[in-house]
Image: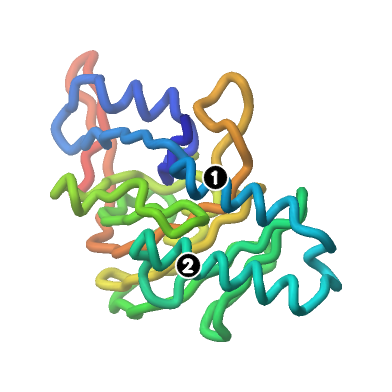
Amino acid sequence: MYLISPFSSPSSVLASSTSRSFPGASAVPVRTSILASEQEQSSMLALSSASGKVKGSNPYNEKRLLEQNKKIQTANNAPDDFPNFVREGFQVKVVTSDKYVTTDSGLIYLDILVGKGDCPKEGQQVTFHYVGYNESGRRIDSTYLQDRPAKIRLGNKSLVPGFEEGIRDMRPGGKRRIIIPPELGPPVGPSTFFSAKQFEVFDIELLDVNDCQRRTIGFYSDVVCN
């Protein structure tokens, strides 16, 4: 199973989605899906087994791989200007338009719409919608379909590093596409739901940013954001 989610720990998300919600708290649902259909997996296998290397490979081979990628993404109804991922064995080349920006950490992003106001700070709660895609452009996860935006506080390691980096310098009302490399993505291994290191693509819409305060009533303590 391949779980695509901006949240850093599958186990912690599962716990939060089933726990009791206190005032000011919001549980975030978890959704899982297969990485790709059998047809996509066979196509991706063909890409990874093609001759040559990504860096310095034959231009004809790379062009052919890109064309195959485009066909798969078109079949999956991928959004406009969606990135391409050319795999040759363990090497991956991300192909994007010149509109995309690459940060020092390796995160790649495209500002679709720049919002207004202040960027969120550590400890504040962000409310956002997102759509998650796999490398084939297939939509895997979407808060829009749930009609319920996600809410999370920054700085408590609840988001995968790449997602938190991508949302930190957004402004309310902004829309951004981020491409998260495996090193900035979720944990991978036998103790998690993640079976392979893949690039993750998210379209994010930042709705609101709120301050948070801890309140204590007797032996009861929680955090309220408004």
Residue 170: horizontal and vertical position, in percent? 39, 69
Q: What residue appears at the point 48 percent right and 53 percent down from the top-left corner?
A: 163
Q: What residue appears at the point 47 percent right and 29 percent down from the top-left corner?
A: 1
Number of marks in picture = 2
30 or 58: nearer the eye?
58
Query: For this view, does 16 lie left or right of residue 183?
Result: left
> Is residue 10 placed above or below 73 in the rendered structure?
above
Residue 88: horizontal and vertical position, in percent? 75, 56
Q: Quadrant of residue 208?
A: bottom left
> Is residue 163 placed above or below 177 in the rendered structure?
above
At label 2, counting other C-alpha atoms closer than 10 Å, the crowd grade (few under 14, some 14-19, many 20 or more) is few
Q: Residue furthest top?
A: 219
Secondary structure of the residue carrying tag 2 is: helix
| Sequence-first disc among 1 and 2 | 1
Query: For this view, does 144 lie left or right of residue 140?
Result: left
At label 1, counting other C-alpha atoms closer than 10 Å, the crowd grade (few under 14, some 14-19, many 20 or more) is few
Query: For this view, does 148 lie left or right of residue 91?
Result: left
Q: What residue appears at the point 43 percent right and 46 percent down from the top-left corner?
A: 6
Secondary structure of the residue carrying tag 1 is: helix
Is there a contact, CB below 8 Å, between mark 1 and mark 2?
no
For label 2, the residue is 71
Could you tell me the amino acid type at mark 1? Gln
Could you tell me the amino acid type at mark 2? Lys
Residue 96: horizontal and vertical position, in percent? 57, 76
For label 1, the residue is 41
Q: Look at the image and tell me whether residue 156 can be seen.
A: no
Q: What residue appears at the point 35 percent right and 53 percent down from the top-left corner?
A: 139
Residue 75: horizontal and vertical position, in percent? 38, 62
